[in-house]
Amino acid sequence: MQPAPVASAGTLAPSESVGGVMAGMDERGAYDHAFEALKSGDYVESSRRFRDFLAVFPGGQYAPNGLYWLGESYYVTQNYALAGDQFQSLLDRFPTHDKAPGALLKLGLSQYGLKQYPAAEATLQQVLQRYPGSDVARTADDRLRAMQLTGAR
């Protein structure tokens, strides 16, 4: 029996289904397959499917979205370290993609979840500076204000 696949910073370990389900799909079909699990609220399955998707289509058209939703799947289940890894990977690989603002915000929120308050504050400040007046900036500002009120700094 093989050990369970593990995703860590910079690597994606596919699950056993990569050779089966994902391998027989085109990129859009594989992305939709992963997204279905996310929409149904099965975040563990969603993370598995998005890992598989990214293993099969690492440089595909939907890779930035795949990284974002993989990060979101981890974030929702409070796996902040893996979530942050995915959001950072998206920012490193696709800095101008339309998911980049959300990824930067979620990176800051993941750092907050890990109680890395100085890093979270710096990242959330970057959101304010890079995307002023946006929804992500408003959310970042709200979290920064909450951090000031609670002394989480």
Image (spheres, rainbow, N blue to C red):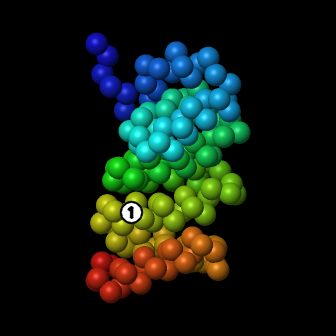
Quadrant of the image occupied by residue 29: top right
Report the quarter where the N terminus lies: top left
Report the quarter where the C terminus lies: bottom left
Rendered view: 151 above or below 25: below
Residue at x 33%, y 53% (from the top left corner): 78
Rendered view: 53 above or below 73: above
Residue at x 51%, y 44% (from the top left corner): 39
Quadrant of the image occupied by residue 61: top right
Question: Is residue 81 visible in this depiction of the protein?
Answer: no
Residue at x 41%, y 84% (from the top left corner): 145
Which of the two residues, 65 or 58, is positioned nearer the viewer here?
A: 65
Q: Residue furthest bottom?
A: 149
- Measured as percent of width and height from the top left, residue 66 is found at 57, 42
Q: Is residue 67 left or right of residue 81?
A: right
Secondary structure, mark 1, is helix
Rendered view: 138 above or below 61: below
Residue type at the position of mark 1: Gln
- Mark 1, other Cα within 10 Å: few <14 / some 14–19 / many ≥20: many
Say which residue label 1 marks: 111
Residue at x 58%, y 55% (from the top left corner): 91
- Measured as percent of width and height from the top left, residue 63 is found at 63, 40
Rendered view: 141 above or below 100: below
Which of the two residues, 31 or 82, is positioned nearer the viewer here?
A: 31
Q: Residue furthest top?
A: 1
- Measured as percent of width and height from the top left, residue 59 is found at 66, 35
